[in-house]
Image (cartoon, rainbow, N blue to C red):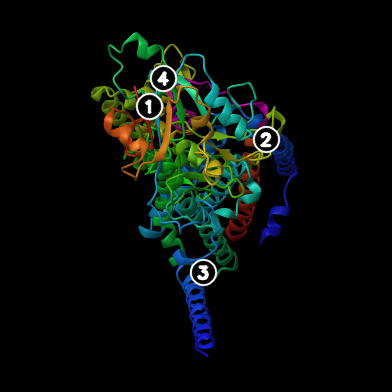
């Protein structure tokens, strides 16, 4: 079936070549990082995680959000998602791969990666995260590939495929819950030390991931003529809207608890992110941009006439994805380190090397998604003829 | 005749005693004639039997004196990059509000505010860093020391995020270029792994005090077994009002301060 990804028009190959160039650039930047160490990034003693871990967190959310099509389609037989569901699953595959690559890129000694499996430590959340992520990757890849293969041959899928898909539904929730637990169990990092972190992770994931899925289906429609249907997109838009509302509601509860209780440790990180602390306000404009664009996109999506109009839908979905990317990436990860355990307020700016590695990993994920979706479109179009 | 018998009897008795002693020394270590006395091996490690701790009398700490930190960093080949981003530190000084941010900051006397306070790994009894480590590269020893295995560390920096005291440093680049006066008694580290104060476990096995404790000209640092009620550190803890850093987090630090 993979041979279908090898036949394409000129613009398809230009796109592939472009992605390969981005990946090559990323690899060369990564080579620098391997040679000189993580000192080539903007990270340091006080802000010891940065862009990589932020991307990881965001992408695990995108991966988990596949459940927003898988669940209604397989458990509630919502037929309008028939063409969208495999796109969601393949998006989950690419996003999971990227999130794992970001972990690898962030490691000081990636050559010792297998130590996590050689010395399994159930008390460490990283151990569980690696288990659920690799399981989720395999599960989605195998089940959706088998479904597509059966569809191509016009036969019902093998008996083991459906149970695997059903298993992937709770697994998706576990993936993002465990990711939240990576942060939420650490004493002394008060922005993360909150029980609402896992629910908020799920809400923001379902909002941003679903919005991203809508955008991907629109790109597919434009570039290949393969249309998953407006009805599916409108339904997804409604799901994204309510997930987004839940996310901002949770953020609101964080604000209430922090500022009403007035406990310094609880409010300092939020204060730093949204208002600045001791005159230092590196992320204040970005966080307000995130908040305003997120709320505005939800207002647009709440209006039925607007979410049915493609330009408004594209605008609102892009704004929602960007908003949550800033909130979950920049805000959540970097804000957790400020102030530092010794009350220092340290700035963080990613370096060019770090940005190139990041783009390279995105390139790998998008290349994989392109190839997988090329196969999907080829199979579906053939069957329609 | 009598002499001969007596000689035989003495001979046999002596032999019997020797055999008995030999057997006893083999079976019962306390009777052994030869002993290998190394502090690490002289008894079987009983988890939790010893809990090493430190008491810092900040009243004795002289302004401008850096001898403890210098001795520590020298003894352990801690690199000095002279920039804050790549900085590696095991033992360092900080003002009151940074070391005790959750202690009362109101109406603190100028004298207390002007003093500097040592920060180092707390070797917590409930250590969040060892819990976060996915490879047991950082682990709790039987004597309470939170140790590092530099050869197992994957450099994920979860321990750094988990430590509420900022006690851990990461080798953002090759540390060997920044060790200005290397010693051969402690290994250097590689790029890409985490390190921190080891409570001088390398010196304790030799029966020595930690480098900082030994170097302090004012004897401001007391090192000892927190589980031994007769130790100096326990006597001082009972006689003085002391503080731990961020005790509300439940990490149970093994480093105490007299303010």
Same subunit: marks 2 and 4: yes
Task: Quote the CA–CA distance across marks 1 and 4.
Answer: 57 Å
For residue A295, the mark is: 1
Mark 3, chain letter? A
Check disc 4 and report the residue beneath it.
Answer: B60
Question: What span is in magenta?
Answer: A330-354
Q: Residue at x 37, y 59 (%)?
A: A75
For residue B183, the mark is: 2
Judged from the image, the secondary structure of the residue bearing numbered disc 3 is loop
Q: Residue at x 48, y 34 (%)?
A: A310
Q: Residue at x 45, y 26 (%)?
A: B219
Judged from the image, the secondary structure of the residue bearing numbered disc 1 is helix
Mark 1, chain letter? A
Same subunit: marks 4 and 3: no
Q: Position of residue A210 (x, y in %)?
A: 45, 42
Check disc 3 and report the residue beneath it.
Answer: A157
Task: Quote the CA–CA distance across marks 3 and 1.
Answer: 42 Å
Same subunit: marks 1 and 2: no
Q: Is residue A372 left or right of residue A135?
A: right
Q: Position of residue B17 (x, y in %)?
A: 48, 76
């Amino acid at each position: 079936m993979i041979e279908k990804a090898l036949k394409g028009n000129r613009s398809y190959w230009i796109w592939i070549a472009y992605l390969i160039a981005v990946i090559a650039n990323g690899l060369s930047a990564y080579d620098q990082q391997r040679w000189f160490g993580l000192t080539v990034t903007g990270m340091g003693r006080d802000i010891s995680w940065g862009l990589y871990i932020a991307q990881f967190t965001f992408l695990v959310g995108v991966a988990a959000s596949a459940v927003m099509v898988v669940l209604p389609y397989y458990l509630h037989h919502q037929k309008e998602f028939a063409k969208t569901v495999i796109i969601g699953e393949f998006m989950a595959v690419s996003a999971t791969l990227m999130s794992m690559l970001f972990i690898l890129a962030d490691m000081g000694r990636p050559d010792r990666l297998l130590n996590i499996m050689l010395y399994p430590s159930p008390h460490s959340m990283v151990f569980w995260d690696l288990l659920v992520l690799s399981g989720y990757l395999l599960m989605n890849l195998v089940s959706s590939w088998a479904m597509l293969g059966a569809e191509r041959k016009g036969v019902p899928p093998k008996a083991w495929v459906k149970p695997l898909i059903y298993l992937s539904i709770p697994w998706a929730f576990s993936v993002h819950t465990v990711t939240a637990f990576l942060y939420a169990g650490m004493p002394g990092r008060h922005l993360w030390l909150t029980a609402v972190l896992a629910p908020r992770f799920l809400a923001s994931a379902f909002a941003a991931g679903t919005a991203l899925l809508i955008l991907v289906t629109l790109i597919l429609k434009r570039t290949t003529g393969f249309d998953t249907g407006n009805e599916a997109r409108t339904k997804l838009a409604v799901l994204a809207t309510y997930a987004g509302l839940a996310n901002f509601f949770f953020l609101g509860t964080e604000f209430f608890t922090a500022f009403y209780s007035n406990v310094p440790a609880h409010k300092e990180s939020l204060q730093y992110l949204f208002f600045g602390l001791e005159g230092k306000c590196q992320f204040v404009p970005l966080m307000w941009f995130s908040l305003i664009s997120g709320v505005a996109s939800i207002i647009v999506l709440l209006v039925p006439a607007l979410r049915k109009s493609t330009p408004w839908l594209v605008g609102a979905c892009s704004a929602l994805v960007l908003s949550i990317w800033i909130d979950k990436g920049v805000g959540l990860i970097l804000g957790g380190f400020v102030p530092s355990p010794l009350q220092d307020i340290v700035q963080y700016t990613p370096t060019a090397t770090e940005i190139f590695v990041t783009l390279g990993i995105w390139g790998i994920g998008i290349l994989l998604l392109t190839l997988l979706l090329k196969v999907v479109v080829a199979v579906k179009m053939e069957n329609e003829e | 005749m009598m002499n001969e018998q007596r000689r035989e009897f003495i001979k046999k008795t002596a032999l019997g005693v020797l055999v008995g002693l030999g057997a006893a020394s083999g079976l019962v270590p306390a009777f052994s004639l030869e002993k290998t006395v190394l502090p690490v091996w002289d008894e079987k490690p009983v988890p939790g039997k010893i809990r090493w701790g430190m008491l810092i009398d900040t009243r004795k700490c002289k302004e401008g004196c850096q001898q403890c930190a210098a001795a520590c960093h020298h003894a352990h080949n801690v690199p000095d990059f002279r920039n804050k981003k790549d900085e590696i530190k095991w033992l360092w000084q900080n003002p009151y509000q940074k070391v005790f941010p959750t202690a009362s900051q109101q109406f603190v006397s100028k004298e207390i505010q002007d003093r500097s306070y040592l920060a180092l790994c707390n070797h917590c009894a409930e250590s969040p860093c060892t819990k976060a480590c996915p490879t047991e590269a950082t682990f709790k020893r039987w004597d309470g020391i939170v140790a590092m295995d530099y050869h197992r560390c994957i450099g994920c920096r979860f321990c750094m995020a988990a430590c509420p005291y900022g006690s851990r440093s990461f080798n953002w680049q090759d540390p060997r270029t920044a060790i200005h006066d290397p010693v051969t008694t402690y290994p250097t580290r590689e790029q890409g792994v985490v390190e921190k104060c080891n409570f001088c476990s390398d010196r304790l096995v030799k029966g020595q005090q930690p480098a900082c404790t030994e170097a302090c000209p004012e004897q401001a640092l007391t090192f000892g077994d927190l589980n031994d009620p007769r130790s100096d550190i326990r006597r001082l803890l009972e006689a003085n009002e002391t503080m731990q850093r961020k005790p509300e987090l439940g990490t149970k630090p093994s480093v105490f301060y007299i303010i």
